[in-house]
Amino acid sequence: MESSVQRVSKPKRAGRVWKIFGAIVLGLLLLLYVLFPVCMGSIASVRKPQAAELPPDGYEAVAITAQDGTPLAGWYAAGENGACILLIHGSNENLASITDHVTFLRSAGYGVFALTLRGHGGSGGRGNALGWDCGQDVSSAVSYLRDKGVSRIGALGLSLGGEVLLASAANEPELRAIVSDGATYHSLADYLELPDNRSLWRSWTIRVMYASTALFTGQRPPERSILESVEKAADTKFLLIAAGNVLSESAYGALYETAANGRAELWTVPNAGHTQGLFVSPEEYRSRVLAFFQETLAEVG
């Protein structure tokens, strides 16, 4: 009788173990493929509290308004050579993060309009760390410079700033020279441009994250992908800067270089982290960027 009880209890214990194991695996899958990307979408949707930055000496604080009424803040200083560079920071950052870029551009004689994207710093608007509505911000900045009488306009964007500029290129033909440092993708369409990313297994997390961001913010990605925008910006030239330590930057940079059809140059900075090219190779970084603007903007006007 005792041996019969033991034979019955062992399968029951084994069944409970398998149920617990299955519950753990299911929980991990839900955490990894649902809760984690939803949390990332939530984080991308929340405005980060940042104070407006005081402009450096020689700059004036600028307040402009986007087409949808969003107030935007920035710094502006006219240049000595008649050209101006629109400078845009990265995601969840502000103008304080681009002061080194401001300095070397101004030292070379360029005017600089350092723009704070919506949802960042002293600008208003709903937060979206993916920059989906920021094309309006670029348009407003270009209009501001045009009203100032600036006819030779270039742009330099870091990370998200670079992605926003590339995505705006087709709509803003007056931006004839764009330097994009650290850009990869900022929409699902951009992400899927790389063949390795197209499987559902590889893209699931990004799909859920972006769907969550759209749900939380009520915003949608731009109609054109970055690649399509670069391709259609027939009169714009590009300098694409990628970090040597971030393989995806070179991969996307190569895609955008090909889409530009001879109007782009890709420079991968050896041993550099994300947007750290200016600090890893300062002399070459400044030299390449300034030579690009000098050559390209000299042809305009």
Image (spheres, rainbow, N blue to C red):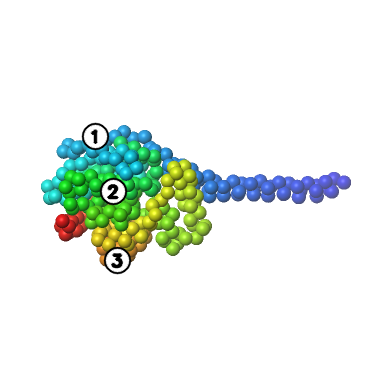
Name the quadrant containing residue 177: bottom left
- Which of disc 1 and disc 3 is earlier in sequence? 1
Task: Name the amino acid, label 1.
Answer: Leu
Q: Secondary structure at mark 2?
A: helix
- Real-space Cα distance between discs 3 and 2? 25 Å
Taking the spot 24% from the left edge, 34% from the top edge, the residue there is 54
Taking the spot 23% from the left edge, 44% from the top edge, the residue there is 144
Task: Name the amino acid, label 2.
Answer: Ser
In this view, the mark in front (3 or 1): 3
Task: Name the amino acid, label 3.
Answer: Asn
Q: Secondary structure at mark 3?
A: loop
* Label 2 Cα crowd, 10 Å radius (few <14 / some 14-19 / many 20+): some
Depth check: give the residue in front, 262 or 246. Answer: 262
In this view, the mark in front (3 or 2): 2
Residue located beneath label 1 in the image: 54
How many marks can you see?
Answer: 3
Residue 288, position in %: x, y? 21, 56
Taking the spot 22% from the left edge, 36% from the top edge, the residue there is 61
Residue 282, position in %: x, y? 22, 51
Residue 57, position in %: x, y? 17, 36
Q: Is residue 209 visible?
A: no
* Label 1 Cα crowd, 10 Å radius (few <14 / some 14-19 / many 20+): some
Residue located beneath label 2 in the image: 139
- Real-space Cα distance between discs 2 and 1? 23 Å
Residue located beneath label 3 in the image: 261
